[in-house]
Image (tube, rainbow, N blue to C red):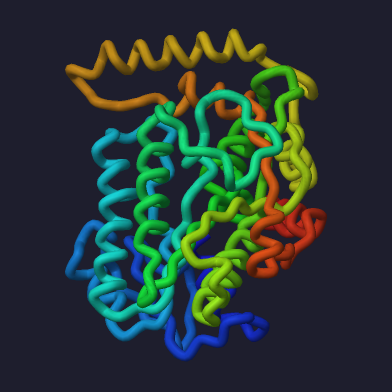
Amino acid sequence: MGSRIVRGLLADDSVLPVQELRVLDIKDLQGITDDRLTFINGDVRDQTTVNEACLGVDGVIHSAALVDWGANRPEVVYDINFNGTKNLIDACKGNGVRALVSTSSVDAIYTGKPLRDIDELEPYPKKYPNMYGQSKSEAEQLVISNNTSSLSTCTIRPADIWGEGDPYHLEALFNMAKSGFYVRLGDGKSKCQHVYVGNCAHAHVLALKALLDGNENVEGQAYFITDGLAGNFFEFFDQIVLQSGQRVWPKNLWLPKWFAYGIGAISELIAWLVRPIKYYNPNFSRFAVNYTCTDLIFTSEKAKRDFGFENKYEVEEAIERTARYYSG
């Protein structure tokens, strides 16, 4: 998503004209070139580097994070997601940055139980299923609490982000399709929200513009972002896999949630048994099964009302663009 935010800011039709764009990241810019662009290779956990990146800028979009469903050590997840955010806030305040938009997550309010038709009034959970949700929640609250007269802040809570280059959903599904054996979890009845990466990036730019323009409605707020109706996780992504030219076989194989949950438990037990020799957490876990098979439905009406969020790309176009990317 970070690269799409950069492309959106540099685009001819950008709603926020940019004279200079400074990018702090641990990897390169994937072929993005522009005379207005300065790249700083670094980590948000390094306060000196973060200070350098924030020197003399008007607004910051903070989307650096470790997206994690239990594969990494909890202390590493917390250090990047919370302490990295704290470093950035300190750098913004120390350098006179006027506005900060931070990428949060729906996991900031995810309890592990179904959440249907919720909005931003949904309270933070007292307990989180994993460190990722806890770290994103604490980081979000830190950003909101640091909204002041000199630094305007808000947070964006995206739904499941998908699109070209998606490393979290589509990559695994395409690998499964290419293996010749395609399995879905649950019974197909659970529903969740999604957001195309281009629309999610657009929401960040709109929010930053609103803060820089002095829109008081946006200051100190959190916003859910989605661009379409709720649907089943696998049924939604299946259409992209099929449209790209991949074969899905078997056509309708679903592992019951209880069965998949049991496999996740066994995977976690094996990881625990070998931990004295090698530390790892399995990607296929009870949390992953539960997250995929649990309703998580919300609305973006607040973002539409407060800073005019609308889809830059309609879902049909986004699906075509993504399928074309993976068919190449």
Q: Residue at x 25, y 61 (%)?
A: 87
Left or right: 39, with 212 as reference point: left
Residue 215, percent from left and from top? 56, 75
Is residue 265 something that shows in the picture?
yes
Residue 188, percent from left and from top? 75, 23
Q: Residue at x 62, y 26 (%)?
A: 114
Give whichever of 46, 279 is nearer the camera.
46
Left or right: 111, with 317 as reference point: left
Name of the residue lying farthest toward the right = 316
Count of numbered circles on the image? 0
Give whichever of 94, 159 is nearer the camera.
94
Residue 90, percent from left and from top? 25, 66
Residue 318, percent from left and from top? 74, 57
Give whichever of 28, 159 is nearer the camera.
159
The picture quadrant where one finds residue 45 is bottom left
Quadrant where the C terminus sits is: bottom right
Left or right: 204, with 243 as reference point: left
Is residue 247 something that shows in the picture?
no
The picture quadrant where one finds residue 165 is bottom right
Answer above or below: position of 119 versus 238: below
Answer above or below: position of 184 versus 148: above
Q: Residue at x 76, y 49 (%)?
A: 228
Answer above or below: position of 15 versus 267: below
Q: Residue at x 65, y 21 (%)?
A: 185
